[in-house]
Image (cartoon, helix red, strand yellow):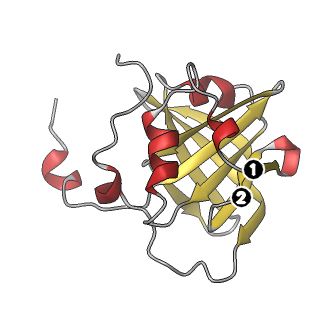
Amino acid sequence: MIDLDPFTDLLDYPMYVVTAEAGGERSGCLVGFASQCSIRPARFMVWLSKANRTYRVAGRAERLAVHLLRRDQDHLAQLFGGETGDRTDKFAQVTWHPGPGGSPILDEAPAWFVGRVENRVDGGDHVGFLLAPEAAEKRAGSDTPLLTLDDALGITPGHPAD
């Protein structure tokens, strides 16, 4: 197997919090593997670890919400990246509201969108969720540096180890 680290070690891409709701169950996690993948029609792909509780909820969800965080929102990054929903109700610790289709929207996020799940793609230890955006919001005055991979390197994943 080829080691991709010599290439990926140079990257410092944005981190996202992805939230899902299915059957009254909510979940959310910190995600580093995500990108816009089409302009027309607009499409965005997020990759969720199969070891993550959010993956299990997202597998039953019709929509996912994708949130950007500011660099100074390390408390949200730690909560959604360093805790597992199997033991912690993350949504009891933040302000949020239901968005389109009941998707949990984090009130503190400077920008978010909700996308309808169009397809799921098995990519190994992660599954890609292809999203068709249905709603998006950017809060006024939110043009500040975003949380990136380098900012989140110290967070130990909250989901169980494989």
Please state if 120 lies on the left or on the right of 97 as rendered: left
Residue 154, above or below 2? below
In front here: 10 or 16?
16
Q: Does the residue at mark 2 contact the one at mark 1 (Cβ under 8 Å)?
A: yes
Q: Residue 62 carries which label?
A: none
Which percent across, then down, holds residue 29? 54, 39
| Residue 138: quadrant of the picture | bottom right
* Residue that appears at 76% across and 34% down: 21
The N terminus, quarter of image = top left
* Residue that appears at 60% across and 78% down: 142
The crowd level at tag 2 (other Cα within 10 Å; few <14, some 14-19, many 20+) is: some
Please state if 3 lies on the left or on the right of 122 as rendered: left
Which percent across, then down, holds residue 90? 62, 36
Which percent across, then down, holds residue 55? 58, 28
Q: Residue 107 carries which label?
A: 2
Query: Mark 1 belongs to which amino acid?
Result: Trp
Q: Which mark is residue 96?
A: 1
Q: Give the SS element for disc 1.
A: strand
In front here: 128 or 151?
151
Query: Mark 2 belongs to which amino acid?
Result: Asp
In front here: 126 or 109?
109
* Residue that appears at 83% across and 24% down: 23
The C terminus, quarter of image = top left
Sequence-earlier tag: 2 or 1: 1
In three-dimensional space, the C-alpha distance between marks 2 and 1, rounded to whole angstroms, equals 5 Å
Please state if 120 lies on the left or on the right of 102 as rendered: left
